Every structure is written in C-alpha cells, then in structure tokens.
Amino acid sequence: MIGPARTHYNFAARMGVMRSADGACARSTLRLDYGPCTDAAQDHEGELVRAVGYSRQGPARKVLQALELPLPQPAPGEARVRLMASGVNPADCNRRAGRGHPMPYELIVPHSDGAGVVEAVGREADIGWVGRRVWLYNAQRGRAMGTAAEHLCLELSLLAELPPQVSFDHGACLGIPCMTAWCALFEDGPLKGQTVLVTGGAGAVAHYAIQLAVHGGARVLSTASTPDKMRQARQAGAAAVVDYRATNCARQLLEAAAGAPVTRIIDVDFGRNLATTLAVAADNAKVVAYASRAEEHPRLPFYELLRRNLRLHALYLATLPPALRRAAQAGIGRWLLEASAQHRVAASFPLAQSALAHEAVERGDKCGTVIVRPQAQ
C-alpha cells in the first residue's frame, strides 16, 4: 500500500537534507554522521532499519514509500528508541499532503508521537534510561525524522517513562493530544472545584482533557455531535454533554452548570464555537483554543472580551515554554499511575500499510488514535 519501490537514501547530515542515492542499494551508499555516542550504540553501526517516508507532498498512496535507512546513532543528550507503536495525528497527514505546510526537507519520515524501549543513549545522557519503556511526543517537529520507523533518536527531554500497565499502543496515543490537554488545563495551576467546558468531547485532545480535569477535581461539561460521541465524552467523565449543533446549546450548558461559573473553556474549534463560548464563559474566564478549522480568521468582539476580562490563549504545543512541557510530562505520569486512564485506538496497521493509516485519519470519522506498528510482526 506504500508503493512498489523500496528507496535507499544517502543522508548528507544527521537531521538535515537527505539526498537520493540514485537507485544504489548497497549498504555502503547509506551514510549518516551522528556524532559521538555510547559504545553500545556504535556496536550496531552499519545496520539498516525499515521506515516509511516521502520526498514530495501529495496523497498518501502516491507519495509514501518504503525506506531502508542507517540505524541512527544518538548524539550527546539523545536516546535511541526501538519504536513499538507510532501514533498518526491529523497534523501528520496535513504535512504529508501539503495542507498549510511546506516541504522543509528532501525526505521526511512522518509522525510525531510514539512509544517503545530505549536501547542506547548518547554521551552526556543518563545511562539509566537504557531499557526503559517510554512514550514520546513532537518527534517530527523541527526535524526530518519521525516515528514511522523501527528506530529513532530523540532528545531525552521529549521522552517520558511509560508505566508497565500501559501498552505501547496506548502509549503512542498520549503524545501531542495528552500533552496539549494537560497544558491547556493546568498551565495556570490547579482546577479543583472549578467548572470546565471541553468542546468536541470525543476528540483525541478533548477525551484526555475531560479525564485529566476530572482527576484534577473539576466538574466537566462537554459538547459532541452524535449519540456515540456523547456517550464517549460521558464515559471519559463529563458530567453533562450537549449537542453543539443544537440552537439552544449555550442555554443547555448553562443549565447543566447549575449556577456555577464556567471558568475555563478548552476549545477544538474556536471560530465555530465563539458565540457559544461568549454565552457560557463567566467573567474573568480563560479560553484555551488549539484549533479553529471552521473559521481560520474569526472576527473577535474585542470590547466584549475586554469588558468581561476574558483571556484567550491560542495554544500550540511545540512553542510552549519547556518548563511547562516538562510539568505536563510529570503530571501525565502521575495521572497514569493514579487513575484508570482511558485510551482509544481507532485502528492499527503494520508499517507497510502506513498509507491506509493516513487515509483512516483523513476520513475524519475515527474516534481515537490510528496506530502504526513499526516492528515486523
């Protein structure tokens, strides 16, 4: 489902421009300068690993190709992870398709989330990471190499320990969705006793946001569009779920709040939901929006926001302060140990069927995360 040809590449730089080897398939044509690494990592130099990537943007079946790449060697401060599961986010598909994203490298191995086992570390890194089960995020943000591969080298700051009771598939669901949810909820501190609205409650970010907010002591209201999605939001812990298409959606939410001020709104579609947001939000509330697909350029009623001291945070995980992201990793780790976390795998595919995984995401009807399993079954 990827394409008939297996492509070999020369890597001109560790994470930079990648040039085609003009069809040459000999192992000696595959070169990559990874810098200094542990002796254990160097023992495996010369090995090839399977991956999936693209050298031009377009439909999944036309541009995704099977690759064989040099086994990556961790640089100082990095770890090499044997990837057991790779999470496919809508942003990964948008980047591959060219929707709002350029082609910053000649070859891209997609996907930013994943889970696996640390098998080597670079110099200046804690050797104690070797052998640990981990989940990771933002792998293909600002770099060419993502998690659609058997192995990946990444800064240790992007890894977090995966508890033994959490499967690799579920670990690959965490990544950007759970990190976004935690930061949107807790960037200003605890939520205990507050009433929080999480829109689109069956979405990947929202499903985690509901659970995290409830675990943090908040009462959660949510919205969804179908009975099944409403059921999923309630199962995650929402006290009330309203159909956002209803003309009286805001009134139903206020009734469900039962007089309690809605002090925080976590929003998946800012422009489309703006009227409801303004009707429901209490004075001095904070609105954290992480997407606005229906209206990319919404008109803001500035003076209404001003008079009510409403705070708007357009949240993008990759550029949040590192300290907040570290706090999110720690907070998610505590939650995984303390709560019965719910994770949803919408579908799973072997690495060779990555195109089908992208198409499953792009259909737009999934509930949960689509997983690619990089290791040979």
Image (spheres, rainbow, N blue to C red):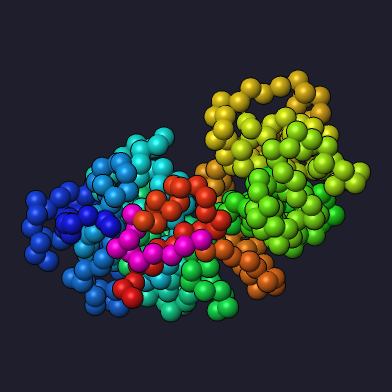
The part of the image, by quadrant, that contains residue 271 is: top right
Please say whether residue 339 is one of the residues in the magenta stretch: no
Asked whether the viewer can see residue 320, the reply is yes
In percent of width and height, residue 241 lies at 75, 50
Relative to 57, residue 372 above or below: below
Relative to 331, residue 307 above or below: above
- In the drawing, does residue 1 fall left or right of residue 161? left
Residue range highlighted in magenta:
346-355
- In the drawing, does residue 21 fall left or right of residue 288? left
In percent of width and height, residue 284 lies at 81, 36
Quadrant of image for the N terminus: bottom left
- Furthest residue in direction front, as rendered: 227
Relative to 125, residue 220 above or below: above
Q: Image point 15% across, 50% down: which residue?
A: 20
Asked whether the viewer can see residue 146, the reply is no
Q: Image point 22% across, 59% down: which residue?
A: 67
Please say whether residue 354 is one of the residues in the magenta stretch: yes
- In the drawing, does residue 309 fall left or right of residue 288? right
Q: Image point 33% across, 76% down: which residue?
A: 377
The image shows a total of numbered marks equal to 0
In front of the other: 313 or 234: 234
In front of the other: 370 or 216: 370
The part of the image, by quadrant, that contains residue 36 is: bottom left
In percent of width and height, residue 188 lies at 72, 48
Q: Image point 61% across, 38% down: which residue?
A: 269
- Furthest residue in direction right, as rendered: 259
In percent of width and height, residue 365 lies at 52, 50
- In the drawing, does residue 243 fall left or right of residue 289? right
In front of the other: 237 or 187: 237
